[in-house]
């Protein structure tokens, strides 16, 4: 009798664990489907990416590298059936993406030490003017880059905008000044 009770208890435990595993699997699959359908803020369908690194004396200066990427994007845009082309320093959501993570400051910040822990940190990427069109990125307010820009400009995400200016609409933020990495520069 005792062996039968132990066997029945073990079967009951197996059934409970099996049910919990089945429910967890269902929830995991449901979450995975929702993540795959979520709006990323950029398109991945019909987008081709290539990872390029420029080395040697020919590309020693930043200006030479910028010129290369601009000319490459122009050449790709001129190919048949290409709708848009652009370049970015580091793809969003790429595995192994190191990116440039920098603290973002208000233009009025002057004392780095006192505010560094209270300011948001953001991934900073450099892009060509055609990148946003090529990636299908939606714009909430303001404008995308033009070539050439007369001054330093930035396009920021909605999440960064809401962390810097939590009670303001995106349209009201156009033209604001912020700093990255160091308090001393724009």
Image (tube, rainbow, N blue to C red):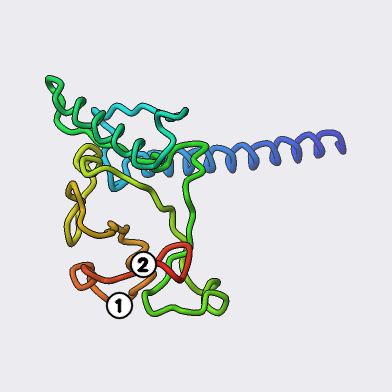
**Is residue 169 positioned above or below 144 on the image?**
below
Measure the C-alpha gap from mark 1 to mark 2. Answer: 23 Å
Residue 99 position, x and y percent, is 47, 46
Structural crowding at the residue carrying mark 2, measured as other residues with C-alpha within 10 Å and reported as few (<14), some (14–19) or many (≥20): some
In the rendered structure, the answer to whether residue 95 lies left or right of residue 165 reads: right
Residue pictured at 44% horizontal, 38% vertical: 94
* Image quarter of residue 65: top left
Determine whether, in the image, residue 1 is placed left or right of residue 154: right
Above-or-below relation of 176 to 133: below
Residue drawn at point x = 21 percent, y = 68 percent: 174
Q: Are marks 1 and 2 in contact (CB under 8 Å)?
A: no
Badge 1 is on which residue? 167
Pick whichever, 119 or 4, lies toward us: 119
Residue 83, labelled with which disc?
Answer: none
Secondary element at image label 2:
loop
Question: Residue 37 location, x and y as percent?
Answer: 31, 41
**Numbered circle sitting on residue 186:** 2
User: Which quarter of the rendering shows the C terminus?
Assistant: bottom left
Q: Position of residue 159 (x, y in %)?
A: 35, 62
């Amino acid at each position: 009798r005792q062996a039968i009770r132990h066997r029945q208890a073990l079967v009951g435990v197996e059934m409970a664990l099996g049910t919990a595993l089945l429910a967890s699997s269902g929830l995991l699959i449901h979450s995975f489907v929702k993540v795959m359908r979520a709006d990323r803020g950029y398109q991945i369908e019909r987008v081709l990416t290539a990872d390029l690194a420029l080395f040697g004396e020919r590309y020693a200066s930043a200006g030479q590298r910028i010129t290369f990427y601009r000319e490459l994007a122009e050449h790709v845009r001129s190919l048949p059936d290409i709708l848009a082309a652009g370049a970015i320093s580091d793809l969003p959501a790429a595995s192994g993406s190191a990116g440039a993570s920098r603290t973002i400051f208000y233009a009025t910040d002057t004392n780095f030490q006192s505010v560094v822990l209270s300011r948001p940190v953001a991934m900073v990427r450099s892009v060509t003017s055609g990148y946003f069109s090529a990636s299908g990125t939606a714009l909430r307010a303001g404008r995308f880059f033009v070539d050439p820009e007369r001054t330093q400009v930035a396009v920021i995400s909605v999440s960064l905008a809401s962390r810097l200016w939590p009670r303001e609409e995106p349209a009201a933020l156009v033209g604001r000044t912020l700093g990255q990495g160091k308090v001393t520069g724009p």
